[in-house]
Image: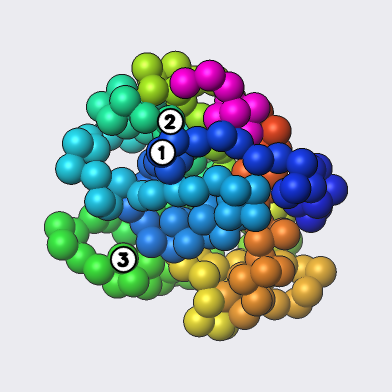
Amino acid sequence: MPAAAIARPSALRPTMTQPLVLGTTNSGKVRELVALLAPFGIGCESLAGLPAAVEVEETGDTFAANAALKAAAQARALGRWVLAEDSGLVVPALGGAPGVFSARFAGVFAGEPREAADARNSGLLLERLAGMRGAARAAHYACHAALADPGGRIVAVAAGTCGGLIGEQPAGAGGFGYDPLFIVPEYHRTFGELAPAVKEVLSHRGRALRALLPALVAALSGPA
């Protein structure tokens, strides 16, 4: 659903003295979140340039739990409004894997570039699905977002999903993570092949953020 179907940018203009902190250093996620929020006058910055940001161990067993953990911990550490999200790929034929372990499905290596980790994760996914066809390759992306106030209190949450199929080989150089494998049936293209503007409308992250927007703008428009 397009963002305009929920609220017109001109109707939602928060009053902010500082940019909203995005609780991630993942450059791909930052690009998507900035693009989604910019039309609503919401300035953003990532954790990358904030020395006071903390490492948050994602100990939750759901996307919702991890999103709340990250938002609350960073908000308390920074004394700022923080929007955090946790998202990943869910494949029913693999018992829901990679799920909350999507970013570390094939393990984590210190200092490894994100692109290399993405390639290893995608390779393991294809290996696990080898020999499966049709509906057995069904999957969906899920995203849970949480907004925390400067004291670390969660004031709004939202979720979004996008269904698709896992291709047998990567296609397209766009997006990140499993995007070149994730086929959107209606378009017969992967997220890696679709234009960013199209992905913004269809994606799990876009849907979650649009659902959160009214509460987010209301919170950021209130008294400091």
Query: Real-space Cα distance between discs 1 and 2?
Result: 9 Å
Q: Where is residue 155 in the image (x, y as percent from the top left)?
A: 54, 20
| Residue occupying image coordinates x 71% and y 69% | 198
Judge the density around disc 1: few (<14), some (14-19), many (≥20) Cα neighbours within 10 Å: few
Instruction: Name the amino acid type tagged 2.
Output: Trp
Picture layout, residue 45 above or below residue 54: below
Instruction: Name the amino acid type tagged 3.
Output: Arg
Q: Which of marks 3 and 1 is in front?
A: 1
Colour setting: rainbow
Instruction: Name the amino acid type tagged 1.
Output: Gln
- Choose between 95 and 164: the one closer to the eye: 164
In contact (CB < 8 Å): disc 1 and disc 2: yes
Left/right placement of residue 59 relative to residue 125 reads: left
Judge the density around disc 2: few (<14), some (14-19), many (≥20) Cα neighbours within 10 Å: many
Q: In which quarter of the image is residue 51?
A: top left
Quick one: SS at disc 3? Answer: helix
Q: Which residue ends up furthest to the left in the rendered image? A: 110
Q: In which quarter of the image is residue 28?
A: bottom left
Left/right placement of residue 96 relative to residue 184 reads: left
Q: Which of marks 3 and 1 is nearer the N terminus?
A: 1
Identify the residue position indicated by label 2 in the image: 81
Q: Which of marks 1 and 2 is nearer the N terminus?
A: 1
Identify the residue position indicated by label 1 in the image: 18
Start and end of the magenta stretch?
A: 216-224
Q: Residue 114 carries which label?
A: 3
Left/right placement of residue 58 relative to residue 22 reads: left
Q: Where is residue 36 in the image (x, y as percent from the top left)?
A: 61, 54
| Residue occupying image coordinates x 84% and y 48% | 5
